[in-house]
Image (cartoon, rainbow, N blue to C red):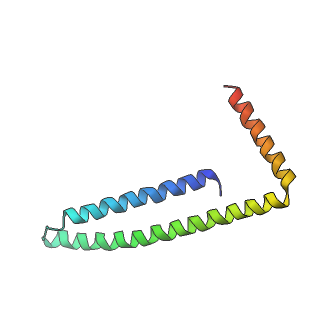
């Protein structure tokens, strides 16, 4: 999994957690309001927040599993092809060094 995709997914999970936290706070702040329409909206929002929490946990678990899988595949490749891995790392280091040196 690429770092950009990983970072994007991590940010999305963090943003959803913040959104859920804000919605929970809103529910707590409006707990004393007893009007019919507001109570109905609070109930629906509470159900959706609970469902969103479950989905975020599932997403996090899937993300962790895929990350571990990618790390294990990388580890296996490096152990099976140590010289190729060293060559790739050296080439990447050289390219990064050249790019940094041009600035």
Q: Position of residue 3 (x, y in %)?
A: 62, 51
Q: Is residue 23 left or right of residue 56?
A: left
Q: Is residue 46 above or below residue 78?
A: below
Residue closest to the eye, 72 or 55: 72
Q: Residue at x 80, y 41 (%)?
A: 91
Q: Is residue 1 above or below residue 59?
A: above
* Quarter placement of the C terminus: top right
Quadrant housing residue 54: bottom left
Q: Is residue 2 above or below residue 97?
A: below
* Quarter placement of the N terminus: bottom right
Q: Position of residue 20 (x, y in %)?
A: 36, 63
Q: Is residue 94 left or right of residue 39?
A: right
How many marks are shown on the rendered structure?
0
Q: Is residue 36 left or right of residue 80?
A: left
Q: Residue at x 14, y 67 (%)?
A: 32
Residue closest to the eye, 77 or 56: 77
Residue closest to the eye, 78 or 14: 78
Q: Position of residue 56 (x, y in %)?
A: 46, 67
Q: Is residue 20 above or below residue 47?
A: above
Residue closest to the eye, 15 or 88: 88
Quadrant housing residue 47: bottom left
Quadrant housing residue 94: top right
Q: Residue at x 75, y 60 (%)?
A: 75
């Amino acid at each position: 999994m690429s770092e950009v995709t990983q970072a994007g997914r991590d940010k999305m999970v963090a943003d959803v957690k913040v959104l859920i936290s804000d919605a929970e706070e809103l529910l707590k702040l409006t707990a004393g309001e007893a009007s019919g329409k507001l109570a109905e909206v609070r109930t629906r929002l509470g159900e959706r927040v609970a469902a969103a929490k479950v989905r975020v946990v599932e997403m996090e678990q899937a993300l962790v599993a895929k990350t571990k899988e990618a790390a294990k595949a990388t580890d296996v490749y490096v152990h099976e092809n140590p010289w190729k891995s060293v060559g790739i790392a050296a080439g990447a280091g050289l390219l990064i060094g050249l790019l940094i040196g041009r600035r």
